[in-house]
Amino acid sequence: MNGGEEVITVTPPQPLEWKFSQVFGERTAGEEVQEVDIISAIEFDKSGDHLATGDRGGRVVLFERTDNKDHGGSRRDLERMDYPITRHPEFRYKTEFQSHEPEFDYLKSLEIEEKINKIRWCQTANGALFLLSTNDKTIKFWKVQEKKVKKISDMNLDPLKAVANGSVASSSNASSPKPYLANGGCLDKSYSSLSNEFSIPPGGIPSLRLPTVTSNEISLMARCRRVYAHAHDYHINSISNNSDGETFISADDLRINLWNLEISNQSFNIVDVKPANMEDLTEVITSAEFHPTHCNTLAYSSSKGSIRLIDLRQSALCDSHAKLFEEQEAPGSRSFFTEIIASISDIKFAKDGRYILSRDYMTLKLWDINMDSGPVATFQVHEYLRPKLCDLYENDSIFDKFECCLSGDGLRVATGSYSNLFRVFGCAPGSTEAATLEASKNPMRRQVQTPSRPSRSLSSITRVVRRGADSPGVDANGNSFDFTTKLLHLAWHPTENSIACAAANSLYMYYA
């Protein structure tokens, strides 16, 4: 080469082989799923040691990681071992609490569901966990902390030596401390009546034992610290906390508000796309997220398929964007469904903030924030459904909002689909990785070749999935799709190749 320069070719990473890890809330065959139990939000915290899910019943369930707490010895002992430790993230149920209750807006005669739309973790402090949860109208700030339960372990009398009423000794197991006076007397009537029945034995009491309070048991307490209400006329679709640790945004169809975590009665409206005349409304906000490291930058997507990057340093009201990302439609391809399927349902920043991943009904798109001419990669997810758009419009499936996520290393992206399937694509240069996985205990089941298509090899299946299958209503292996079972919500572990996804009321976890 020129000047003796050596060309370095970067080989793309090998495709991952996904394995089943855990399932929570698995339903038995034929079991009917209750509407309130269907999971509506999933979120890992920044460390990946905690996972939160929200459901349509307004509950938030927390899980904690268990596999990294006990590695079976000191680091020095582990280093002496010749074999590598192959561990994958394992979680266990931690606690749950009722975040939202159904409400009724009497002014608008509107019923407000308790369904959790989004959950976002905040910075931890003093061993306590903090998170934001929202339904359609109200955002809440929760603190989850371990509290020691105080118990009285010993009463005044030694049960072995004093001849006392048996119930006095057994009362040492009381779950809450009784109100004692300064001189040791007790205000509780049951205690005073028992002491009246007791008579001092001849020779007196050989031993006197004072009550001691112990804190053996630890219970988790969830407390609502703040309620951020009455700031949105339309349904909240996104919340996102800022990297400054002090502020967060909430977005509805027409407005984005900026909040301070400590102030619940005031917010600043930073984006307002509501026209003076609602008949002139052409697009709505569908998703919004803060940049992971730049506290002045955020992005929001619209129903027209565009993403706007805004800079809070430019002006207080950010109606004008700093950058606009959109893909020009091919001439002659416009149809009745063009705008519906172009609507972006979710956007996510990559961990380093360089890329934005967006999900519309048909595709996943990866955008470089330094290049607004078009996406750097497009992954076909639902191309095989194009001939069935009429049917999907009739049954409202065309309006389903699928989420997307990126791996911590930025090499892969994932999103959900129908029949409880989800797709994982490699987005590194030169990568052809495209896997279709099923939310079940055998995630690779859909990758196995079916007898109906004996001529197609496994490698060609993954390529077809990447481009989009050729049979309408049928996946790459000839299996028909079920539009009633859809995998809308999923999250990628921030540091490892592990995915959590929701299939109705079940939470499935996979690792590679």
Image: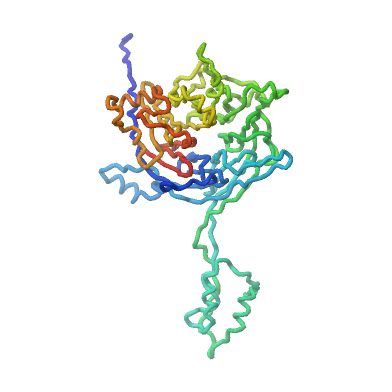
Q: Could you say where residue 289 lies in the image, as x and y percent from the top left?
A: 56, 31
Q: Residue at x 52, y 49 (%)?
A: 127
Farthest-out residue, bottom: 202
Q: Residue at x 47, y 33 (%)?
A: 483
Q: Residue at x 27, y 27 (%)?
A: 454
Which quadrant would residue 104 be assigned to in this image? top right
* Nearest to the observer: residue 147 or residue 359: 359
Farthest-out residue, top: 2
Is residue 264 visible in the rendered image? The answer is yes
Q: Could you say where residue 440 lies in the image, as x and y percent from the top left?
A: 39, 41
* Nearest to the observer: residue 367 or residue 344: 344
- Quadrant of the drawing holding the C terminus: top left
* Nearest to the observer: residue 472 or residue 1: 472
Residue 63 appears left or right of 136: left
In the depicted structure, whether residue 275 falls above or below residue 395: above
- Quadrant of the drawing holding the N terminus: top left
Give the total number of marks visible in the rendering.
0
Which quadrant would residue 56 be assigned to in this image? top right
Colour convention of the picture: rainbow
Q: Could you say where residue 130 lies in the image, as x and y percent from the top left?
A: 56, 45
Residue 212 appears left or right of 497: right
Is residue 354 visible in the rendered image? The answer is no
In the depicted structure, whether residue 403 falls above or below residue 115: above
Residue 278 appears left or right of 114: right
Q: Residue at x 60, y 36 (%)?
A: 248
Q: Could you say where residue 310 lies in the image, as x and y percent from the top left?
A: 60, 24
Farthest-out residue, left: 82
In the depicted structure, whether residue 24 falls above or below residue 180: above
* Nearest to the observer: residue 424 or residue 79: 424
